[in-house]
Image (cartoon, helix red, strand yellow):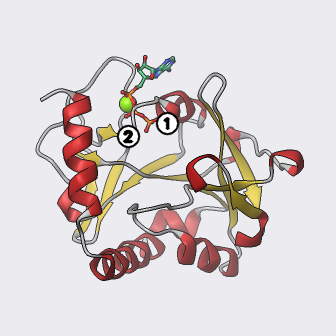
Amino acid sequence: MNKSDLRKIMANKRSRIPIKIRTSKSEIIMNKLRSLQIYNDSKLIFVYVSFRSEVETHSFINQALKDGKRIAVPLTISEGKLLLPCEIYSLDDLAPRTLGILEPDKDNIKEVNSKDIDLAVVPGLAFDPSGNRLGFGAGYYDRFLPSLRKGAITIGVCFDEQLVEQLPVEDFDVPLDAVLTNLGLIQSEKP
Ligand SMILES: Nc1ncnc2c1ncn2[C@@H]1O[C@H](COP(=O)(O)OP(=O)(O)OP(=O)(O)O)[C@@H](O)[C@H]1O
Ligand SMILES: [Mg+2]
């Protein structure tokens, strides 16, 4: 199946998960994330700000800040479809932008150097056990992920319903080091 057909199916599937289940699974995923060694070892964590039916990250952000982590979130630049990692100190630093997605204030950003990011937590509509990811189809993450330093760890998070056997992959798709669902961590099998 091609990416765009799969996107429709997986977006539909995710949005049909009842909100209570999404919330409880999100909590399980984020607790697992916080229990990983890489979380402990990370000083600067890049994490998306969830919207609609995505795995919820708001409580994680609050908790990570309390744990003394530095947090950077995406600011999307539609021109060039770029994603800038910007540091926030509280969820109050965010305001609704395109499509109602919460983002840092464009006029007062504290962009971080991508090379300083230790861990990147990435959303998606679907993932496979090789760490391949299906996003919304604009390529934001495929452009952003190569800017991380070599030793940085990338983790895709999703509900178990979003795991598929194998995703279609194109040359520019950047696989992740691991996929974390409510059922556990899957470290990518490198082909
Ligand atoms: N490194 C890159 N440089 C330039 N264009 C790119 C790059 N990576 C991806 N693209 C472009 O982005 C488009 C969308 O890519 P793809 O279908 O993989 O989206 P996606 O990974 O699902 O989206 P997103 O990350 O925004 O959720 C592709 O048509 C591709 O041409
Ligand atoms: Mg892609």
At a point 52% along the width and 67% down the height, the residue shown is 39
At a point 26% along the width and 75% down the height, the residue shown is 18
Q: Secondary structure at mark 2?
A: loop
Distance from Cα at disc 1 to Cα at disc 2: 8 Å
Q: Quadrant of the N terminus?
A: top left
Q: Quadrant of residue 176?
A: top left
What's the amino acid at mark 2? Gly
Who is closer to the viewer here, 137 or 41? 137
Number of numbered discs overlaid on the protein picture: 2
Q: Quadrant of residue 93?
A: bottom right
Disc 1 or 2, which lies upstream in sequence? 2
Q: Which residue is identified by label 2?
A: 135
Disc 1 residue lies near ligand 1 with CB under 8 A: yes
CB atoms at circles 1 and 2 under 8 Å apart?
A: yes
Q: Secondary structure at mark 1?
A: helix
* Place of residue 99 in the rendered image (x, y in percent of width and height, measured from the top left): 56, 49
At a point 49% along the width and 61% down the height, the residue shown is 51
User: Does residue 179 appear left or right of residue 87 in this picture?
Assistant: left
For residue 99, the mark is none
* Place of residue 166 in the rendered image (x, y in percent of width and height, measured from the top left): 14, 38
Disc 2 residue lies near ligand 1 with CB under 8 A: yes
Q: Which residue is identified by label 1?
A: 141
* Figure check: 170 above or below 34: above
User: Does residue 30 appear left or right of residue 143 in this picture?
Assistant: left
Viewer can see residue 130: no
Q: Quadrant of the C terminus?
A: top left
